Image (cartoon, rainbow, N blue to C red):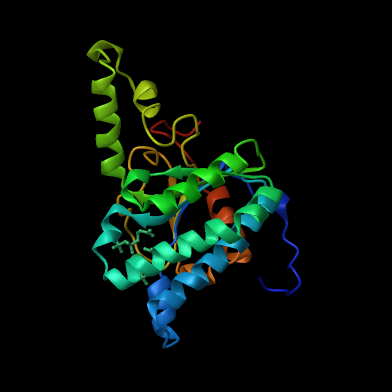
Amino acid sequence: MSNRQKEPLDLTAIKVPDHIAIIMDGNGRWARRRGLPRQAGHRAGVENLRRIIDACVEFGIKVLTIYAFSTENWGRPPSEVRALMRIFARVLDQEVYELHEQGVCLHHLGDLSGISPDLQAKVKRAIELTKNNDRLILNVAFNYGGRAEIIHAVKQLLQDNVPADAMNEELFSNYLFTKGLSDPDLVIRTSGELRISNFLIWQAAYAEYLAVPEYWPDFDREALYKALLAYSNRERRFGLVTA
Ligand code: IPE
Ligand code: IPE
Ligand code: MG
């Protein structure tokens, strides 16, 4: 983490959303720009995540959801997939205690059974360790896809023999990985891409969307603050008209 002095930021100037979700994109391009392998970009991305978690705690955000590995990312070259799994395992081994100290409660979104037993065990241990923390809920979407999540929910509903008449949005939401959590207020995608890439397609139906130019490893506390300023100037109408 950088030791430079934190710039004082006026937190009274922003409306702090309860829940922000981030598509952490641009690690590969960040690395290529430096003549480094893509893996170096992923490592820099993890270091940045630490900074952003600190900033979320500082700004009073209650829930942070991050897109770390999609169901589609399995199609990347095997060496890159292996590197991502290694990085995830290392974070779970080395960073979880610090997150715990900080009051972070870890959740996982996605299909855990699709990852190695060793990694599954690490995820379960981290969730168990941090389950009573309430400063910041950190949802890690790993082996996550919005369509796969919806299919998973439908299968469970059918298994539970839920009658058609009982079905409504609230009940359906309770079958998603985000059960019990508020919907994201703001979805940020770094690296300038204008896509949702199968992320929270149900939950983000009415989220404010913001694409920022920085590659993920460069998206720092000040950039997050700027994003929150932009969010504060949005008018969320939810289909209604302005009073
Ligand atoms: C995001 O960065 C991290 C993951 C998808 C795991 P990318 O790896 O997609 O970086 P770019 O988009 O190729 O620059
Ligand atoms: C989305 O980024 C997935 C994650 C950030 C984990 P991608 O880089 O995989 O998305 P596309 O391929 O550009 O849509
Ligand atoms: Mg990408």
User: Residue 138 versus residue 6: which sits nearer the camera?
Assistant: 138
Q: Position of residue 154 (x, y in %)?
A: 25, 29
Q: What residue is drawn where x is 48% and y is 60%? A: 89
Give the quadrant of ligand 2.
Answer: bottom left
In terms of depth relative to the viewer, which is nearer, 81 or 239? Answer: 81
Q: Residue at x 27, y 60 (%)?
A: 74
**Vertical placement of residue 48 versus 233, above or below:** below
| Residue 148 versus residue 116 in the image, above or below | above
Quadrant (top left, top right, bottom left, bottom right) of the N terminus: bottom right
Image point 61% across, 42% down: which residue?
A: 130
x and y percentages locating residue 164 in the rendered image = 23, 14
165 or 231, nearer to the observer:
165
The location of residue 10, given as percent across then percent down, is 73, 56
Position of residue 97 in the picture relative to residue 142 (left or right): right
29 shown above or below 8: below
Find the residue positioned furthest to the front. Answer: 118
Residue 184 visible in rendering: yes
